[in-house]
Amino acid sequence: MWKLLLKFSAALMLLFYCVLAAAAQDEPVADSLEQLKKEVLSINRELFILEEDLLFPASTQVAFYVSFDLGYFFKLDSIKLKVNDQWVTQYLYTDRELDALKRGAVQRLHVDNFPVGEHEVVAVVVGYGPENREYKLAVSSKFEKDTEAKLLEIKIVDDDVKQQPRLAVKEWN
């Protein structure tokens, strides 16, 4: 936390110095301010990365993602995620988000810290199938959290034989 404050105060001192230097050298203030803006954005990005590392260290981090395959037999409306018998998130989808998922996008649904050991995840998906029939699907899976970061993907896949969607949980290494 102190590192973040030091970087922020250093950025403010740098801003003050640049303005003074520009005034002393008759350099256009706009040029020095543009350079300062770039440096502040760079420092801001570094602060964001540090904050993520502090809040979600790799040794305890578990991230959940959602992907969609084809989507001919299912129009996703919402998803709810339960981990270890506690609801952790829910999400309602817009048409633009659904279009992105159908084109191959993957959405980060939830990130959290978990201790080492066995955990259970339950995903409940609500949407519409052929003839606008409402579907409510659920998938449950157990996963083992070790000392490395864990990535889990909830896949919504069309089942061509049954002409309906199915869910699966995939662990990434």
Image (spheres, rainbow, N blue to C red):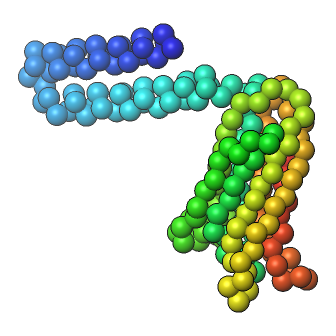
Q: Is residue 172 visible?
A: no
Q: Quadrant of residue 26?
A: top left
Q: Is residue 99 left or right of residue 43?
A: right
Is residue 145 placed above or below 90 in the rendered structure?
above
Q: Nearer the viewer, residue 164 or 13?
A: 164
Q: Is residue 57 visible?
A: yes
Q: Please provide percent x and percent y for residue 150.
A: 79, 37
Is residue 12 placed above or below 122 in the rendered structure?
above
- Identify which residue is drawn at 14% across, 29% down: 29
Q: Nearer the viewer, residue 96 or 22?
A: 96
Q: Please provide percent x and percent y for residue 101.
A: 64, 65
Is residue 173 placed above or below 162 in the rendered structure?
above
- Identify which residue is drawn at 65% across, 48% down: 89
Q: Please provide percent x and percent y for residue 15.
A: 25, 20
Instruction: Report the label total.
Output: 0
Q: Nearer the viewer, residue 15 or 124?
A: 124
Q: Is residue 30 left or right of residue 103?
A: left
- Identify which residue is drawn at 85% across, 26% down: 116
Is residue 137 placed above or below 109 in the rendered structure?
below
Q: Please provide percent x and percent y for residue 4.
A: 46, 17
- Identify which residue is drawn at 74% across, 41% down: 86
Quadrant showing the C terminus: top right
